Image (cartoon, grey):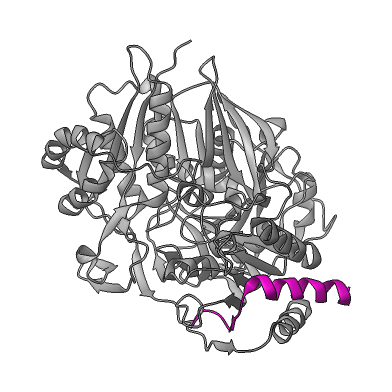
Amino acid sequence: MSNSFHIVVCGGIVPDPLQTLEPAIGPNGPALKNELLLPHVLDPWAAHALYEAAHLAKAHAGSPPVSKVWLVSLAPKAKLQQVMMTVAQRVPFELVAVDGPSGGFTDSFDVAEALAGAIEGVPGLDRARLLLFGGWESASRAAGATMQMVGERLGITEQFQGVDELTVGEDGSLRILERVEGGQHQVSVCSGPPAVLGWATGNLPEPANSPQIGMQNMRLMMSALQKAKPARVGAGCTFASVALPKQQRETRVVKGAGVEEIAREIVEWVTAE
Amino acid sequence: MSETILFLAHTEADSSLSRLALEALAAAKSLGGTLVVALIGSDVQTAADSIAGCGASRFLSVAGEAFSESRYASDAAAVEALVKAARATIVIAPQTSQFARCVAGVAQRLGGRIDTHVAAIAEGPQVTRWYYRQRMEAAIERAQRPWFLLVESGIAEPYPSRDQQGAVAVEMLPAEVSSRTRVLGRQAPKAERQTIRADAKLLFVAGAGWTKKQADGAAHIDDAARLILGFLTATGASLGSSKSLVDLSGEGQAVLPFLSHMNQVGQTGSTPRHPKGLSTCCHGEEPHVVGWRFIRERRAINLDANCGWARGKADVLYVADAFAVMERVNALLVETA
């Protein structure tokens, strides 16, 4: 039996993890200092979701109806365009852009409303074959709440979070491994789409750049960016404070000591109550 | 406005409440207001009796075999029924995989708001949580109700439960179960042995350096595996890795055979809580610090004395070859045992 899917990946952009971040209080609440100047990347967990989506679509290309991947992203248009220059070369997808703040100090409720609205407006999307992908958390708000809310807004009650593996059965069922406590996976079988999958790291490495795929994606990308609708996304709460952790430690550097001396000190420390 | 605080928990396989759930109960009690207890599980009476003296005005539950497994559709239906019945304005629940999966969806259904990974709750109520993967901390307040809070471990001393603390009358609520999902069970990752121990006193972090070429120009994966597993066996430590398996394999690097996705700490991994942490062969990037945010005492073994990761983040940095040091550490541990 041929299984094909319409896979919508929700993915925001975040500052490059190697950047030093500092909070700044502006007229609209907290933000990052020089936020718009910081280099950004596709959120790491959302990126894993995108690679898994592309892999699934390729493995289950289907004869019409065929599988297809959309990336729905809420971010400032100009910043999103910069990030897409790189992401577009990774895997084939169609961008659906929503113009709004991408920072972590926004509320997942508002973000979910904007994303669900954009997904409902995707032309030709078959909701019966819909797999809604995203990261199980973001590297900005890191709440792990948005995907569930988008799913609820779209009426999807089969949801999975912390997903590391998805296998499609011959009958179209979905066998899913989710991260749970104790370093284990919970194994579930869902009869088929629609379903929400919030991905952890999955199993796929970052694909190599492909100029060919980049050209193919870019044909529609500029138009999608131009058509991006503005979204009203707020904090939804009052921030009493935002601060960097005050835990700079006085590091004792042990240099030039012998292996025996170091080993004894470590053993003493490890075995001390 | 007087708040109605709903303490929400699910039972464990043995029908008890976890330590994290009891910490969440203590946090819920600290807020004052009217306390209601809500329990989900196959059989909740034992758990309810163990916290009979917590001062709750009502004990509610959704129970039965359908709720013995963790699954979005049934869990969300149960939580929705409980919150509605309690007319809760604030819901406090432990940050478990079961609630992380479903409670945000219920907040959406009920027009509420949710904050997860809550690290502290103060009067107001005002909650503290981390942003940007534990790189900055914010204190927030909300007017919107119901307000759902998933709290992390360490938020309070656990409520002192005990068997048969009393006998409570639990109000059983119906919840419609309609799901296309079957839970088959749990499985450990494809690794030689279980190396993640949440209750361990020590976290041992193996950096990518263990699998890289050493001074002799060759990688020594077997030696690395032997040393790391030897240390874990001797100390009962939990194992973390500083880089994701998919990243390592994507870069064509060898991977230690017992590492799984679950071992990763840091930017796309976990931020475990252990009293002590020993890192070895880790790089110097700032993001790795996020995996260490909740480790109290930190030491590192690294060949780079200027490692930006260790300086200012670790209490002690040993500038040495981790292969040599760990060989001797393991030998000393065997001698002292």
The residue at the point 39 percent across, 38 percent down is A51
Q: Is residue B4 magenta?
A: no
Q: Is residue B322 magenta?
A: yes
Q: Quadrant of residue B115?
A: bottom left
Would you place residue B135 above or below residue A177 in this image? below
- The spot of residue B96 in percent (x, y) is 60, 51
Q: Quadrant of residue B301?
A: bottom right
Would you place residue B142 above or below residue A169 in this image? below
Left or right: where does residue A134 sit relative to residue B159? left
Q: Quadrant of residue B27?
A: bottom right
- The spot of residue A32 in percent (x, y) is 28, 68
- The spot of residue B51 in percent (x, y) is 75, 57
The residue at the point 31 percent across, 49 percent down is A12
Foreground of the two, A180 or A18: A18
Would you place residue A208 above or below residue A172 in this image? below
**Magenta span of residues:** B311-337
The residue at the point 28 percent across, 33 percent down is A93
- The spot of residue B177 in percent (x, y) is 59, 27
